[in-house]
Image (tube, rainbow, N blue to C red):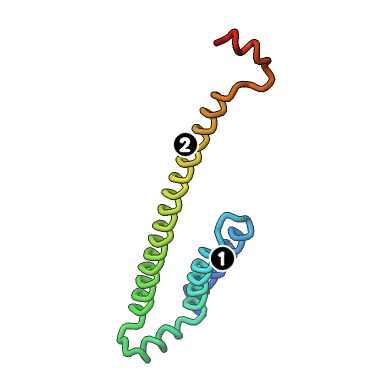
């Protein structure tokens, strides 16, 4: 096995170990970890079995096998960016709805505080209230 193959295989395994560590420490959400584990697995497979790319490329009719990896990588990145934008859009909608709910609750709280200020205090005797008016 060539040195570069072993090195890229080890890079994939190290990336996978780091991702598992990040998930266990709660620094990376499990949904996102799946993407990164797939990428790490891809590094490991490509590093430990580079002839698999040649085999797949020749069956697909691609004359220059390394371009298959580049095209697949680019496609995965585009898909990941689209999914990130979808998640961001959902987060923005949730943020706007939470801001609206907070504004409604603050308005209701202000109304209740105003009405509570108008009600006479039950602990004060009625004669002292008559003097104050």
Pointer 1 or 2: first along the chain? 1
Residue at figure coordinates x 57%, y 9% from the top left: 132
Pinpoint residue 79: horizontal percent, then vertical percent: 38, 69
Drawn side of residue 36 relative to residue 74, left or right: right
Q: Nearer the viewer, residue 14 or 97?
A: 97
Q: How many marks?
A: 2
Residue at figure coordinates x 50%, y 37% from the top left: 108
Q: Badge 1 local density, few (<14 within 10 Å), some, or many (20+)?
A: some
In the picture shown, does residue 42 fall above or below 26? below
Q: Secondary structure at mark 2?
A: helix
Disc 1 marks which residue? 14
Disc 2 marks which residue? 107
Pinpoint residue 56: horizontal percent, then vertical percent: 41, 87
Q: Nearer the viewer, residue 16 or 99?
A: 99
Q: Badge 2 local density, few (<14 within 10 Å), some, or many (20+)?
A: few
Q: Quadrant of the C terminus?
A: top right
Front of the two marks 1 and 2: 2
């Amino acid at each position: 096995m060539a040195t570069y193959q072993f090195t890229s295989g080890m890079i994939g395994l190290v990336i996978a170990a780091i991702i598992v560590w990040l998930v266990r420490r709660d620094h990376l959400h499990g949904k996102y970890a799946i993407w990164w584990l797939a990428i790490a697995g891809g590094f490991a497979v490509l590093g430990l079995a580079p002839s698999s790319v040649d085999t797949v490329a020749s069956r697909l009719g691609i004359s220059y096998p390394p371009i298959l990896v580049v095209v697949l990588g680019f496609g995965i990145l585009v898909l990941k960016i689209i999914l990130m934008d979808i998640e961001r859009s959902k987060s923005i909608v949730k943020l706007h709805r939470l801001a609206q709910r907070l504004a409604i609750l603050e308005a209701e709280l202000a109304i209740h505080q105003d009405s509570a200020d108008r009600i006479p205090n039950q602990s004060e005797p009625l004669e002292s209230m008559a003097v104050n008016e």
